[in-house]
Image (tube, grey):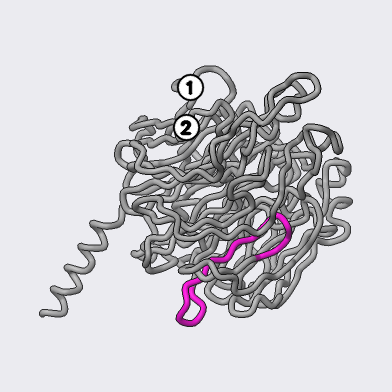
């Protein structure tokens, strides 16, 4: 009797600390064993692994087939908001600035919320994936705003400007920890800097914590000191530095210590601050616990595409930490691992920041680890981008040894739908890796989504999305490269994939595809 009461009190304490539908701090799966995907990272530790998925397995993955497709209206050829799947609903943003709530089984629209009703008519693409918890949908926009919507109705509860800089954008998804929403702030100022008349640069990357109930600012950690005017160009355009070190990715947390981990990008001007770094912060106060800088200096904007000039005198390698961290245990030690655009996966001691090992999977410009990696309790899974070819890797957590490597096929861009647009395709993985027990999912620029065997990297199944789809919303559209800024989502016996992405290379599209298994599987 006493033990029963103790368990009941413990369950009540956990329920009070954690919003409903959020992965508990002590496990990778849902407390009730439901197969859901409530946030970009899947869980607060950033595993991108759904341990509760029991229908899609190594034995059944080959039977996956399209169930429905949703064609995004007014698509600009790109789709980068990874879905969240909770309570039988799919929550996803479009590059048209609209957040949609769809029925997971049928694709029918439950409600939609147009951000332009709040921000005005200027384009406002939604790039980050929403986080759904406690009856609320949280997401960011391309004007630096963070929203909270009622999960059932789509009604706006609050919107907060995470940063007032005119170039501020939100690309990494919010992390909900207890009653705090932690968000990285990024910027499109690196694009503005390509204009010779633009006074580069004044944006400072940051991580902010907002009250999840009201949107009020709790704390902010800047990645660079305030910029100051350092001179002017030969044409009289002011120059400011340091700047940049944006936080592109989604944070992760060690729930036992309340330590938040974020990765930062390169400088836009100057060399000051914590660019290309992993930063550990106290979740309650924002106080720095440690910082590890991996690459320095690394000053780069689109101006550097013009070659060496007074606006880009020493072009950096552009080796951001654009990937979200993974927090896990190796023996009796808590560690944090993260992939870098340099192609290196780094493992740090979570308490001290000490480097435990580094493994190089690729090298070169745009050849590295772009958005995110997955950890299933046995292996780390990381994919490389324009690495000629890109490849999916399995890494041993304790040592950093590469256990297997699965390269993209040499004919991936000359067969299937990609063959119709050969100049748009490259043998590249731009997407984050996702996994369920026994299966790893990764999409590529050739428009195919593939399922790999976790133990050896064998391809179990693939589907070519570069084709025309008729959406359940009555629109017709094409698929393209598997979307960057996110990855496949596996929940409730279904696989959800965004198709269509282009940045430099890539095949245009704008379709969300839901795959399922035959009845009885």
> Which quadrant would the N terminus be assigned to in this image?
bottom left
Name, please, the residue furthest toward the bottom.
Answer: 331
Residue at 17%, 68% (x, y): give it: 9
Estimate how packed mark 2 is, as few (under 14), some (14 to 19) or many (20 or more) residues with alpha carbons within 10 Å: many
Q: Distance between the residues labelled 2 and 1?
A: 9 Å
Where on the picture, by quarter, is residue 136? Answer: top left
Q: Which mark is residue 145?
A: 2
Q: In this view, does 236 lie above or below 50?
A: above
> Which quadrant would the C terminus be assigned to in this image?
bottom right
Q: Which of 253 and 269 is in front in this view?
A: 269
Residue 355 falls left or right of residue 8: right
Magenta highlight on residue 332: yes
Q: Residue 92 location in percent, x, y? A: 52, 41
Q: In this view, does 157 lie above or below 87?
A: above
Q: Which of 198 and 89 is in front in this view?
A: 198
Q: In this view, does 469 lie above or below 56?
A: above
Residue highlighted by disc 1: 119
Q: Which mark is residue 182?
A: none
């Amino acid at each position: 009797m006493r033990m029963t009461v103790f368990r009941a009190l413990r369950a009540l304490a956990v329920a009070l600390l954690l919003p409903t539908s959020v992965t508990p701090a002590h496990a990778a799966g849902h407390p009730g064993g439901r197969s859901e995907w409530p946030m970009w990272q899947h869980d607060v530790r950033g595993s991108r692994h759904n341990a509760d998925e029991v229908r899609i397995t190594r034995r059944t993955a080959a039977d996956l087939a399209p169930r429905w497709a949703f064609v995004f209206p007014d698509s600009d050829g790109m789709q980068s908001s990874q879905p969240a799947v909770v309570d039988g609903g799919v929550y996803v943003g479009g590059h048209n600035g609209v957040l949609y709530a769809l029925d997971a089984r049928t694709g029918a629209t439950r409600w939609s919320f147009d951000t332009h009703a709040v921000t005005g008519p200027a384009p406002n693409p939604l790039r980050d994936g929403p986080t759904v918890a406690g009856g609320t949908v949280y997401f960011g926009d391309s004007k630096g705003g963070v929203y909270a919507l009622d999960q059932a109705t789509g009604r706006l509860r609050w919107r907060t400007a995470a940063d007032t800089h005119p170039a501020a954008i939100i690309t990494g998804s919010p992390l909900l920890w207890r009653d705090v929403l932690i968000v990285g702030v990024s910027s499109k100022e690196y694009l503005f800097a390509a204009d010779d008349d633009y006074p580069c640069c004044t944006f400072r990357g940051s991580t902010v914590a907002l009250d999840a109930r009201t949107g009020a600012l709790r704390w902010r950690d800047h990645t660079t000191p305030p910029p100051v005017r350092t001179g002017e160009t030969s044409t009289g355009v002011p120059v400011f530095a340091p700047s940049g070190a944006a936080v592109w990715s989604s944070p992760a947390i060690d729930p036992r210590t309340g330590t938040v981990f974020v990765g930062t990008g390169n400088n836009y001007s100057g060399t000051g601050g914590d660019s290309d770094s992993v930063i550990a912060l106290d979740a309650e106060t924002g106080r720095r616990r440690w910082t590890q800088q991996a690459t320095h200096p690394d000053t780069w904007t689109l101006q550097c595409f013009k070659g060496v000039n007074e606006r880009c005198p020493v072009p950096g390698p552009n080796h951001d930490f654009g990937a979200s961290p993974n927090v896990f245990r190796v023996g009796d030690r808590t560690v944090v691992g993260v992939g870098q655009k340099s192609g290196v996966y780094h493992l740090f001691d979570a308490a001290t920041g000490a480097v435990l090992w580094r493994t190089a999977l690729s090298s070169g410009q745009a050849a590295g680890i772009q958005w995110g990696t997955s950890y299933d309790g046995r292996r780390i899974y990381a994919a490389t981008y324009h690495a000629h070819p890109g490849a999916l890797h399995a890494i041993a957590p304790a040592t950093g040894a590469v256990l297997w490597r699965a390269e993209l096929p040499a004919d991936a861009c000359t067969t299937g739908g990609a063959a119709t647009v050969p100049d748009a395709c490259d043998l590249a993985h731009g997407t984050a890796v996702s996994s369920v027990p026994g299966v790893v999912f990764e999409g590529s620029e050739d428009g195919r989504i593939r399922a790999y065997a976790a133990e050896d990297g064998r391809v179990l199944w693939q589907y070519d999305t570069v084709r025309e789809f008729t959406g359940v919303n009555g629109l017709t559209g094409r698929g393209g490269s598997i979307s960057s800024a996110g990855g496949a989502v596996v929940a409730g016996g279904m696989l959800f994939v965004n198709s269509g992405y282009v940045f430099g290379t890539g095949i245009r599209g704008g379709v969300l595809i839901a795959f399922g298994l035959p009845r009885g599987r």
